[in-house]
Image (tube, helix red, strand yellow):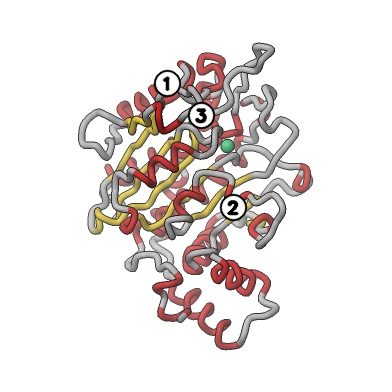
Amino acid sequence: MKTFCTLSAFALIGTCATPKYSARIQSIKDSIKLEDSTLIVNYANTITSEELSIHLYNFSSKDFEGRRVGEIGAKKAAEFLKNYYENEGIGSPFMTNNYYQNIPEDFLTNGIKASENVLAYIKGSEKPEEVIIISAHLDHLGVTDKGQINFGADDDGSGTVAIMEIAQAFNIAKKEGYNPKRSILFLHFTAEEIGRKGSEYYVLNPVFPLKNTVADLNIDMIGRVDAIHKNNKNYIYLIGSDRLSKELHYISDKVNNAFYNIDLDYRYNVEGEKNQYYTRSDHYNFALKDIPVIFYFNGEHNDYHKPTDTPDKIEYQLLEKRTKLIFATAWQIANQTKRLEIDSNNKLLN
Ligand SMILES: [Zn+2]
């Protein structure tokens, strides 16, 4: 981990990069060939602020009682997602109508009742054994001691509905003859708010072998604007993109430059940054298994972890644009000829 972080500093800041290292990075950049841009843009355009809004008002409604892990609200949220995938005709990886990975009570401990991750899946047409994961957590904080519901519209309703729309876009493409070459797993974790237990359980009990898991694009809070960016809303924080795979970092960058021009803000990716967001959401359990990750995040705001995190405060146009970027990045990783390279296997960097 230490070595990768040092390289990360070279790549992003460039102050101490040797000419040889810079040449290697340039070779990686040059090796990235973007997939068909017409297809990417067409299917990304099926992701709309209107649909994101409808899903989010449902998902963060009082019916789900703040989606506390193990409680009835989280069960309803899981069922909502299952019903969505069934209605959309998007299958599960279990080859039945079961979309749940059950997490037993003894794994969750502290009296928390059994809960479930929700998984949907589109099988790759050419390299089905290679899997890209797009993830977000479905659980939140439940109800406060004073009886107020923590709606969790941004945290992480925004990531949840982004996945719903991304899955729909891939499925429309599939129906029109553009099945992704690699498989895509849409993974909604439970128990993030009690210490990332849903993702921990998944990496201990993976549905597909971790060695064939190409990357995890994890989304946790992408519907709001933080104080730092109140005058420049066209941004998103990216964390972790260069730590295990420089290629992933430059793919993400190239896709963004080609299609969306969002200000990709890396300040929280700096080694030693005091908030340590790299370790603070579900992607980290994949990074610990040497699977390259990108964590998409809008930063904290005044409503973070409060009952006031409500769907009326979401910036839906911005949520749409950020969701499209994640879709386009996933499309590239799923369809490019060569599997995404992990730096320790990358001849250019050795
Ligand atoms: Zn969260």
Give neighbour class at mark 1: few <14, some 14-19, many 20+ (Cα, 10 Å). Answer: many
Q: Residue type at mark 2?
A: Tyr
Q: Tell me, yes or no, whether the two marked residues, 2 and 3, touch with CB atoms within 8 Å.
A: no
Q: Secondary structure at mark 3?
A: loop
Q: Position of residue 199 (x, y in %)?
A: 44, 42
Q: Name the spot of residue 131 as percent of width and height, x first.
A: 33, 52
Residue hosting label 3: 139
Residue drawn at x 54%, y 68% is 4
The residue most toward the left is 95
Identified at 38% across, 38% down, the residue is 168
Q: Quadrant of residue 34?
A: bottom left
Rendered-image quarter of ligand 1: top right
Q: Dot 2 lies on which element?
A: helix
Query: Mark 1 highlights which residue?
Result: 75
Residue in the image at 56% along x and 58% along y = 240
Q: Residue 40: image x %, image y %?
A: 42, 53
Marks 3 and 1 sit apart, C-alpha to C-alpha, by 9 Å
Q: Is residue 274 left or right of residue 251?
A: right
CA distance separating discs 2 and 3: 20 Å
Dot placed on the residue nearer the N-terminal end, 2 or 3: 3
Residue 154 visible in the displayed image: yes
Q: Classify 10 Å Cα crowding around label 3: few (below 14), some (14-19), many (20 and above).
A: many
Q: Residues within 10 Å of mark 2 (few under 14, many from 20)?
A: many
> Which sits earlier in the primary sequence, circle 1 or circle 2?
1
Numbered mark located on residue 297 in the image: none
Q: Is residue 243 above or below residue 322?
A: below
Residue type, numbered disc 3 = Asp
Q: Residue at x 43, y 22 (%)?
A: 113
Above or below, 293 relative to 245: above
Q: Which residue is mark 2?
A: 278
